Image (cartoon, rainbow, N blue to C red):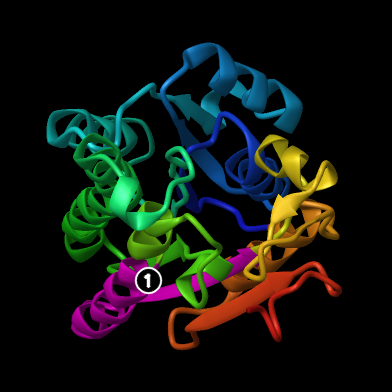
Amino acid sequence: MITPNKVALVTGAGSGIGRAIAIQLVQDGFSVTLTGRRRAALEETAQLAGAEEDKVLMFPADVSSPRDVAGLFEATHAKFQRLDLLFNNAGIFTPAASIEDVSLEHWQAALNVNLTGAFLCTQEAFKLMKRQEPRGGRIINNGSISAHVPRPRSATYTATKHAMTGLTKVTSLDGRQYGIACGQIDIGNATTDMTEKMQKGILQANGSVMVEPTMDVRNVARAVSYMASLPLDANVQFMTVMATDMPFIGRG
């Protein structure tokens, strides 16, 4: 798939799912802005993608900071003059805890990155997409299986991912009049550094610990590539991509 002269911005692009998506988008022909907290990680992603210097922008930023996010989108516009795709991917896990033991600090940290970060990036994307010619664009949110059902001891992550579904829906609705499409991909057990612990066993709803199946993260990249390839009059509203045998259907 070749997508000439289109521009994407990927948050959390320095590792894991964000890195895999960024690499795929470069291969698809997008110019790509890579953002995350660590420049070295972004440079590694760009190198792995084989991105040409004039088709990649590395911009370290904290997506929970309005100032950082505004600077990120200003720099993207300055380099590429437009934005066709935003992939809201940046997210954190806080320490596992039963809900009564979750600290306010951890609760707010998860909200700040997982939800407020996506909200701030969506706002800035709207501003660009509404005024550019041709007008419009696409936003894809990383929802997670946890947007549907929780794992034990995951109040912060689960709450933010359920809220992401609401953000996806209202973004899709508010974007209609401007040619802005918004969809969500819910990912289950893609192999990244964050899922390594699943190979050692992870707590289940019945109190047992079991090793869970995982899938190649490139399957997620191909799914996002398909979502991004659609014309703006078509949209994948929600897509679930998961390891076939993971305990999701029937979880609990």
The amino acid type of the residue labelled 1 equals His
- Where does residue 234 sit, x and y in percent of width and height? 49, 87
| Magenta residue span | 162-187
Asked whether residue 86 is in view, the answer is no
Residue 165 lies within the magenta run: yes
- Where does residue 176 sit, x and y in percent of width and height? 25, 85
Question: As rendered, which of 41 and 194 lies closer to the eye?
Answer: 194
Identify the residue at horizontal 26%, vertical 46% (top origin). 107
**Residue 137 horizontal side relative to residue 214, left or right:** left
Residue 109 lies within the magenta run: no
Identify the residue at horizontal 34%, vertical 56% (top origin). 99
- Where does residue 5 sit, x and y in percent of width and height? 52, 50
Q: Name the residue under label 1.
A: 162
Determine the image quadrant of residue 249.
Answer: bottom right
Image height of 7 relative to 224, above or below: above
Q: Counting other residues with Cα less than 10 Å from the Cα at mark 1, is it few (<14), some (14-19), or many (20 or more)?
A: some
- Number of numbered discs overlaid on the protein picture: 1
Asked whether residue 39 is in view, the answer is yes
Question: As rendered, which of 141 and 165 lies closer to the eye?
Answer: 165
- Where does residue 46 sit, x and y in percent of width and height? 63, 25
Identify the element where label 1 is drawn: helix
